Image (tube, rainbow, N blue to C red):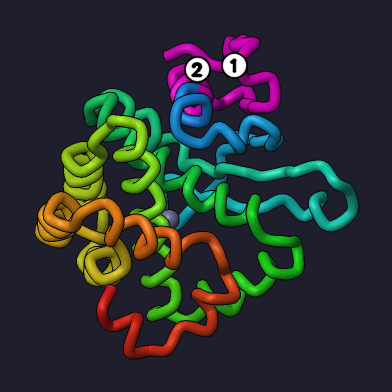
Amino acid sequence: MSFNSFSNSSCPKIHPSSQTPVQFSELICETIINYYPELQNAQIFLKPAKMKWAILQSRFGIKRAFSKNNHYIIEFNAERVYEALHEVSREAFQSILLHELGHTLTYYHNSFLQNLNLIFVITNNRRNQAFEKITDIIAISRSLDRGFEIFNGLIEYRNWHQEHLSSTELKNYLVTYYQEDELINLKSYLSSASSPELKPTIEKLILNLNQIANLPLGFLEKL
Ligand SMILES: [Zn+2]
């Protein structure tokens, strides 16, 4: 495993730490260029962190409050990321990066104050579940727009992640994130909906944390 030798001049704003596997930095760079071009202006720091059961976690930087620099962080559980890079396919790892960068895109489109609203979103279980599922839909929409089908990779990744969870964690994981059956249903829904119908549905869900925080609970049930 090589670390910190990331020198891709196409992504000068990605900042790995000394413990960031080089494949991880490279794949983040590739994912931004191919699927989230607007994030090429964002400073993204890849930092190892202690996490209870999460493997990757996307955050906005507090420095954003004081400057115009767009500063974001993707924290990772180093041990689990190394395992994932060896045990899941490249497609599966890229699928979860599309999800994490979907969170980054949401923070990027919201002001610092709007992002603070996230505390309200993530401390409410049902709203957090909506936030995670909407982020999957952002990732799916980006991948489909650009010719990559994310579904199989995401199913593989979620099934793999499940194997590392305790029974209590698993219970929470299953209701928070789309799993295999739901992703298969979503895929058949998306392929049966014609694009004129589909686009506004996706666009409507996108990116506004205030909207997620204020969604009627009935809407959350449907996600
Ligand atoms: Zn997430």
| Residue 75 in which image quadrant | top right
Image quadrant where one finds the N terminus: top left
Q: Which residue is mark 1?
A: 4
Q: Look at label 2 and name its amino acid.
A: Val
Residue at (44% x, 66% y) in the render: 204
Residue at (44% x, 72% y) in the render: 128
Of residue 42 and residue 7, the one placed in the foreground of this image is 42
Q: Which residue is mark 2?
A: 22
Indicate the position of residue 59 as horizontal and vertical percent values: 60, 53
Indicate the position of residue 156 as horizontal and vertical percent values: 18, 41
Crowding at dot 2, Cα within 10 Å, few <14 / some 14-19 / many 20+, comes out as: some
Up-down: is 91 above or below 9? Answer: below
Upstream in the sequence, badge 1 or badge 2? 1
Left or right of 86? Residue 75 is right
Indicate the position of residue 209 as horizontal and vertical percent values: 57, 69
Left or right of 98? Residue 187 is left
Left or right of 200? Residue 36 is right
How far apart, in angstroms, are the residues tagged by discs 1 and 2?
6 Å
Q: Label 2 CB, ligand 1: below 8 Å?
A: no
| Residue 42 in which image quadrant | top right
Q: Is 6 contained in the magenta span?
A: yes
Q: Is 163 contained in the magenta span?
A: no
Image quadrant where one finds the C terminus: bottom left
Q: Is residue 83 visible?
A: no
Q: Which residues are magenta?
A: 1-29
User: Magenta span: helix, strand or loop, mainly?
Assistant: loop
Q: Look at label 1 and name its amino acid.
A: Asn
Query: In the structure shown, which secondary structural element does the residue marked by tag 1 occupy?
Result: loop
Of residue 144 and residue 68, the one placed in the foreground of this image is 144
Q: Are marks 1 and 2 in contact (CB under 8 Å)?
A: yes
Q: Is residue 128 visible?
A: yes
Up-down: is 84 above or below 124? Answer: above
